[in-house]
Amino acid sequence: MASNVVFSNIVVVLWLCSILVMTPAESRRRALEAPQELAQKFSRNPETLSLASTDYGHIVYKTPWAVFEPSSIVDIATLISFSNSLPIPFTIATRGRGHSVLGQTMTRDGVVLNMTHLNDHFTDINNASVSAFSITCLPLGFCYADAGGEQLWTDLLSVTLKLGLTPHALTNYLYLTIGGTISNAGISGRTFRVGPQISNVLELDVITGKGEFVTCSPLINSELFYAVLGGLGQFGVITRARIPLGPAPKRLFWLHLLYTNFTTFSRDQEYLISLNDTIAPDFVDGQVLLSNQDQPDLSSYSTSDQPRVTSLIKQYGIVYVLELVKYYDNNSQSRVEQEVENLVKGLNFLPKFRFKKNASYEEFIDRVHAAELYALRPRGLWDVPHPWLNMFVPSSRIVDFNEGVFKGIILKQNISPGTCLVYPMKRNKWDGRMSAVIPDEDVFYSVNLFHYVSASYNVKDYEAQNQKILEFCKDAGIKIKEYLAGNKTHQQWVEHFGSKWKLFEERKLEFDPKRILSPGQGIFQ
Ligand code: FAD
């Protein structure tokens, strides 16, 4: 009797050991034993693996064991369920367009789920074929789009604009996937008015980390809905998003107003976003031009104006550009022109440095892509490392931030800054139930340091500068929140989420208990 007990204990211990010593290699071997219909969708082609081993940042490199190329949503659910069924599941890194900058779409030895492969193969969970986008307009004129999570915003727009419609919230750059930006926030100079993209989603289809297909919205399965918005890919794979649409503007007045005094500049920005919607601009952005920028972006000024903008930058070292946009249509042009004049009258920019353009909506929303094609790619500045730093800075400390960071660190250092943006937004446009984290103030600024590494500099210098900026904010008690963050330790992530951490952790346990999804964020691994 006693020896039987000893024997069965030994069997249990041996079984446990066999699980515990299972290596990633063993896990991969089991992946090879996946059902035939799944196994044939793993690609181990060196070129495919190499593409999935990097991202837009070109700073982090991790080679996955395989890339999974789904041709339906069922494939994604089967993949995740299969991983869950293994004693040691393999990790699955969902990849949209890979426009992250710090390895967020990568997994070492796991499987990269290539969402864009679905583009030509979109089928719903019941395998009924549906097109990538469907547009619905209800009788009272309320319209929305249903779009695959793998779709690019620019492709959605090419469908909606033909119908005279547009999503309310767009990013500055549109060659990003819907699932990718919704996993972060999706912001621009329009966020102060309409909120980030994650505040502009009506419903989602998500395949959770348990492999379950769930439709969620503020009314059904709302816990998953809010978890996924800004959820950094941690809780599920977004396969469909329902996005509200409104009438697309036809044309717009686009102004660039220059300042040499930051306090005046930021006061004017905050004044503009405080106005009620009928008179407020439709878009408010801000750019910082610095004398140590190798190639400051002067594309918004005519070639005849560029020399005097350049000499202003040389004279002051730092110049702030307030960008203001007001939409109009055929019937409202003269009225809106007058409204713009009224708006500008109340501002304190340098009177001789006011530039006005009249542009189409399409030209405006495609401006970053145009810069990609005609300025950055030809100069070899697109496919280089991008040591970006993006932050949300509370309004009460933005002047200290300017002194300490723009003037005190970036301007003083001997490395060329990339494009620097700074513009305010409002907390009340963000829903606190979403996973995204923002500062605890009614108004806060998005500060984007879009660095690129050209031949004369190296990544390490920018990384050291970014670190110095974060340390400065910490020491000065400026309670920033990073946006598009990466490369953090577990403890740093806990601090990042702050009071939301407990909820974030509980949601992970509920929707992806085996911690399979998006390991490249480094939050739970
Ligand atoms: P990826 O980088 O592929 O993925 C991002 C994260 O989301 C990863 O963790 C991934 O695992 C997860 N993920 C991807 N797809 C899904 C899905 N379907 N379901 C669940 N999780 C998923 N951001 C802004 O807010 N505003 C801007 O104006 C802006 N401009 C940009 C301009 C450029 C040139 C670049 C490179 C980036 C810009 N970004 C901007 C940042 C951008 O929003 C993020 O980098 C976003 O992650 C990129 O989208 P992607 O489709 O390439 O996602």
Image (cartoon, rainbow, N blue to C red):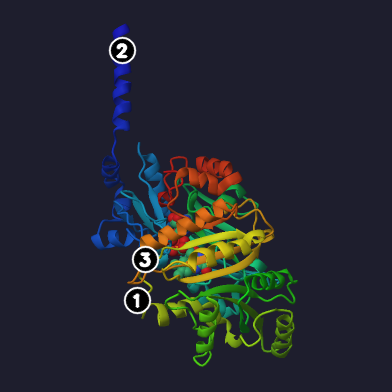
Please tell me which of labels 3 and 2 falls first in the chain.
Answer: 2
Mark 1–mark 3 distance (CA, rounded to whole Å): 11 Å
Of callouts 1 and 3, the N-terminal one = 1
Q: Which residue is mark 1?
A: 380
Question: Are dots 3 and 2 in contact, CB under 8 Å?
Answer: no
**Residues at discs 1 and 2 in contact (Cβ within 8 Å):** no
SS for tag 2?
A: helix
The residue type indicated by label 2 comes to Val
Q: Secondary structure at mark 3?
A: loop
Q: Is residue 21 above or below residue 217?
A: above
| Residue wearing tag 3 | 385
Quadrant for the C terminus in the image: top left
Residue at x 43%, y 61% (from the top left corner): 100
* Image coords of residue 48 (percent x, y): 29, 61
Numbered mark located on residue 6 in the image = 2
Tag of residue 354: none
* Residue 255 in the figure: left or right of residue 345: left
